[in-house]
Image: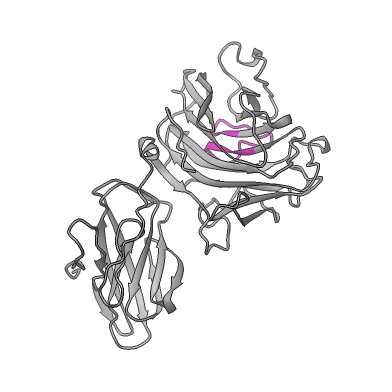
Amino acid sequence: MLAPFTFVVAMATMATALDIPISRQFHGGFQSEFCYTLPHFVAGWTAHLVFDHSLASLDVSTAEIVKTLNGGKDYVIQNKHYNSNFEAGEKLCLKLTAHTNSGDQPKGYFYIEGIDHPIDEHGHTHPIPKTTVDPQLAHVHPLWVLKNIPNSATDPLSAFHPQKSGGFDEGSLGIANDPSGHAGKVLRVFYAKGSYVRVHTHRGAQFYAHPVDPRTSMTLSYDIYFSKGFDFVKGGKLPGLYGGATNCSGGRHSDSCFSARLMWRENGDGEVYGYIPEHQAPGFCDKPDNICNPVYGSSIARGSWRFKTGVWQNIAVHITLNTPGQLNGKVKIWHDGQPKLSLNNLNFRSNNDLKIEGLFFSTFFGGSDTSWAAGGDCYTYYKNFVLSAADDNPAIIG
């Protein structure tokens, strides 16, 4: 049985830290299980497990330990992909197994950054800045949020929980300081001069990630920064959404999947680049800004917006899957919060089992020949990733 919860009392109007209860002791350590009720909505969280003396080891089965502070007394933990978002009143539950350096039983407490007030060794509370969700973000019902790469991260993909198949890196993907000079680490992709998709070194990066449950409707929003002087050449791929299996790209089509990446084209013109069924609404391929390709993907609404270089900008894409047998699928695009595209007669699937899985991070120059190759060494940078449910407003958190 769990030990009763006890609270360290602060002012009545403030949230307080929670004493860590001991549910089982064993020789050389202890286990703890406890739940914490969230006072308001959170989209992604960072918390602390603080002990009065250092531990030999600590395992948290329902969170990721990202770093230790204060000589091993303060463990900083973050959500896993399946427990990032909580509504007000929902419970965050943790399971700990600790080994101690001595026979003494440590005392500890738990607090969430931006919600609770940490307590020092003298029992004094110290308010920390409130980090509530932006009202616009709450409005769009976020499913998963990644603002920056954690400062302690050494693997740029650790925060995305990517699938093991369908990806490549080859030295292009990394963690970097914000190119605009703002605080925080961001994701960076390097493209070497002369690289394109068929040159297997420093050509870009690709991975699939599904940090949320499959859905029939989803919006992806992120901030992107093209390095100063970025030469767009003929075009290249950018992250988008995917559904079903992970093989709808590179000239491979299947009834078991779809993908809807974004592309930059010459001069930075933007488009949706879709691996979608050939059967679409009458006249779909006759529109001047749609270019249908029976071998590769189809360009949708080319030139509906234009990417800039040397500045951060937000791009958001929404997909609502069609009812199988009907042409009622939707795609929407916002660039820097401004609506740029809205279609409601698309075909993405022929069976109900196919759902939107999540993020298809894919970026490289190309095109499949050297005419698409990067004209010089260049970079793109990424931050403020949000997967959300609403289709009427993008989630911009920058």
Q: Left or right: where does residue 151 sit relative to residue 14?
A: right
Q: Quadrant of the N terminus?
A: bottom left
Is residue 348 in view from this perspective? no
Q: Position of residue 322 (x, y in %)?
A: 46, 24
- Region of the chain picked out in magenta, as a range: 238-261
The residue at the far bottom in this view is 103
Identified at 62% across, 41% down, the residue is: 311
Q: Is residue 141 within the magenta segment?
A: no
Is residue 320 in view from this perspective? yes
Q: Position of residue 131 (x, y in %)?
A: 37, 52
Q: Left or right: where does residue 58 sit relative to residue 153?
A: left
Identified at 24% across, 62% down, the residue is: 16
Res 125 → quadrant:
bottom left
Identified at 26% across, 70% down, the residue is: 20
Res 245 → quadrant:
top right
Task: Please tell me which residue lies in front, 255 or 145.
Answer: 145
